[in-house]
Image: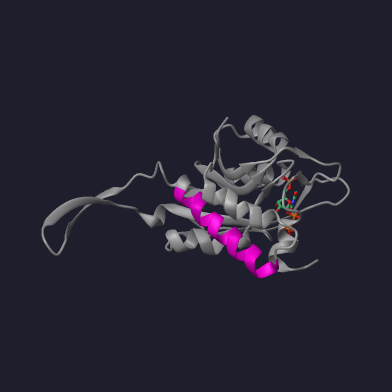
């Protein structure tokens, strides 16, 4: 499976604060952003660099530089917005698109309400942001929308993923790599990830 899980004590430490029901909005938001940055760092491991020649204060040298114009971040609204500052802090010149989706409370199916991406999106590697991958429905639909616009290379960054959603995503889009901080255990009857962290959007924006 194309799933890269961040196995790291610092990530487990940060997740322990995120998962804690007593953690408030400010700290929750800060950690979602921080983990977003770590996920982006890992997702860029295979990035191709352009060779450039520079002068250090001591010598001339050849080195590698990232062409940031090759990338676009696409947060899935609302919760994906929480990861945006983290990823933009490491690739500040990437373009940004937005996909608005919410999960119908009865059917748990995603409903798309907004789609706006850079006009040259088909020439960019797209990195989708959403803290939660539960049934996988939102991720699958977002990827389909981007592919229908001609996007060829897509990565999906999430904080917590459920095995069931990962399996469904792998069946539909085997070419998409998923980077997550942790693969959790299962989905409950309301399709919430267990042990999880609750409703990511509500906790980021303080709406409940
Ligand atoms: C959450 C989450 C994902 C989706 C995951 O969004 O941020 O987008 O649910 O569930 P799935 O894998 O079963 O599709 P939600 O619908 O709660 O919207 P919000 O971000 O506006 O809170
Ligand atoms: N969306 C969330 O915010 N949390 C879950 O556990 C599942 C979907």
Q: Residue at x 59, y 60 (%)?
A: 31
Magenta stretch encompasses residue 86: no
Position of the N terminus by quadrant: top right
Task: Residue 205 in the image: state x and y as whole percent.
Answer: 71, 67
- Seen in the picture, residue 40 relative to 85 is either above or below; the reply is above
Q: Which residues are magenta?
A: 24-41
In the image as oriented, which residue stretches furthest toward the right?
106
Is 51 displayed left or right of 166 in the figure? left
Decide if residue 127 is in sight here. Answer: no
Magenta stretch encompasses residue 39: yes
Query: Which corner quadrant of the image does residue 19 belong to?
Result: bottom right
Q: Depth check: give the residue in front, 59 or 138.
A: 59
Decide if residue 53 is in sight here. Answer: yes
Task: Residue 119 in the image: state x and y as whole percent.
Answer: 51, 58
Q: Depth check: give the residue in front, 65 or 142.
A: 65
In the image as oriented, which residue stretches furthest toward the left?
59
Q: Residue at x 55, y 55 (%)?
A: 35
Say how the picture is coloured. one colour
């Amino acid at each position: 499976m194309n799933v890269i899980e961040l196995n790291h004590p610092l990530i487990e430490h940060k997740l322990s604060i995120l998962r804690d029901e007593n953690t408030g909005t400010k700290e929750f938001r800060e950690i979602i952003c921080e983990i977003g940055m770590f996920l982006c760092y890992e997702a860029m491991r295979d990035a191709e660099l352009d060779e450039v020649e520079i002068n250090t204060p001591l010598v001339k040298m050849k080195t590698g530089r990232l062409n940031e114009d090759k990338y676009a971040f696409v947060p899935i609204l609302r919760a994906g917005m929480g990861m945006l500052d983290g990823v933009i802090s490491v690739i500040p010149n990437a373009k940004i698109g937005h996909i608005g989706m919410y999960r119908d409370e009865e059917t748990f199916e995603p409903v798309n309400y907004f789609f706006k991406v850079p006009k040259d999106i088909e020439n960019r590697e797209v990195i989708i942001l959403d803290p939660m991958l539960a049934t996988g429905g939102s991720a699958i639909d977002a990827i389909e929308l981007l592919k229908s616009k001609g996007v060829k290379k897509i990565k999906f960054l999430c904080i917590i993923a459920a095995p069931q959603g990962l399996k469904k995503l792998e069946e539909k889009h085997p070419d998409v790599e998923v980077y997550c901080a942790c693969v959790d255990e299962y989905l409950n009857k309301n399709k919430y990830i267990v042990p999880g962290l609750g409703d990511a959007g509500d906790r980021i924006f303080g709406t409940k």
